[in-house]
Image (cartoon, rainbow, N blue to C red):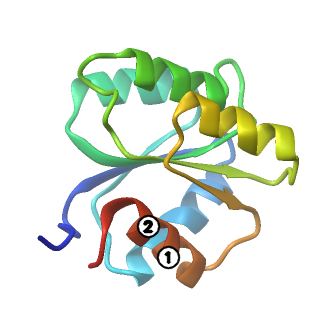
Amino acid sequence: MPVDTNMAILVVDDYRHMRGVARKLLSQIGFNNVAEASDGSMALRKLKGGDFGLVISDWNMAPMSGIELLKAVRADDKLRRLPFIMISAENKTENVLEARAAGVDSYILKPFNAQTLKTKIQSVLGDF
C-alpha cells in the first residue's frame, strides 16, 4: 500500500527557519499536512493529542532534545511505533549509535535536500 501523502507530519526544531526549510522540502516531495513544534516537550504534547504518521526532529534543542523526545515516544504505548527520523548537524558516530539504540528509524545530516529527505522517508515508510 502506498504512503498517504496527506498524513500529518510533525517537524520539530528550535529554529523557525529550519522548520520552514523542512516544511518547504516536504511540500516539494508531496507532503503538505505539516505541523511544527519548537522543542521536544511541545512535540510530545502535540503527539499525544494528535494523529501523526511521522516525526522529523532535530537533535539539539532545549529544554527537551530530539533524543529525549525519541526515548519518550518509544516509551509511550500509544506512540512507540510512530516512525521517527532524526536530523542533526553533528556527524558524530556516537550520536548515530545512541539514536539507533533508542529506536530511531532513520538519521539525516544537515544540510540536506528534498531528494535526501524523500529517500529517507521512503526507507522508513515505503514508496509514495
Q: Residue at x 21, y 68 (%)?
A: 3
Residue behind mark 2: 123
Few, some or many C-alpha atoms within 10 Å of disc 2 (few <14, some 14-19, many ≥20)? Answer: few
Q: Residue at x 35, y 16 (%)?
A: 76
Q: Is residue 7 left or right of residue 66?
A: left
Q: Which mark is residue 119?
A: 1
Could you tell me the amino acid type at mark 2?
Answer: Ser
Residue at disc 1, secondary structure: helix
Residue at disc 2, secondary structure: helix
Could you tell me the amino acid type at mark 1?
Answer: Thr
- Please say if 11 is above or below 50: below
Q: Is residue 92 left or right of residue 14?
A: right
Looking at the rendering, in which quadrant would you find the C terminus? bottom left
- Report x, y in % for residue 63: 68, 18
- Report x, y in % for residue 111: 76, 69
Between 90 and 11, the one nearer to me in the picture = 90
Count up the numbered dots.
2
- Please say if 122 is above or below 10: below
- Report x, y in % for residue 45: 37, 21
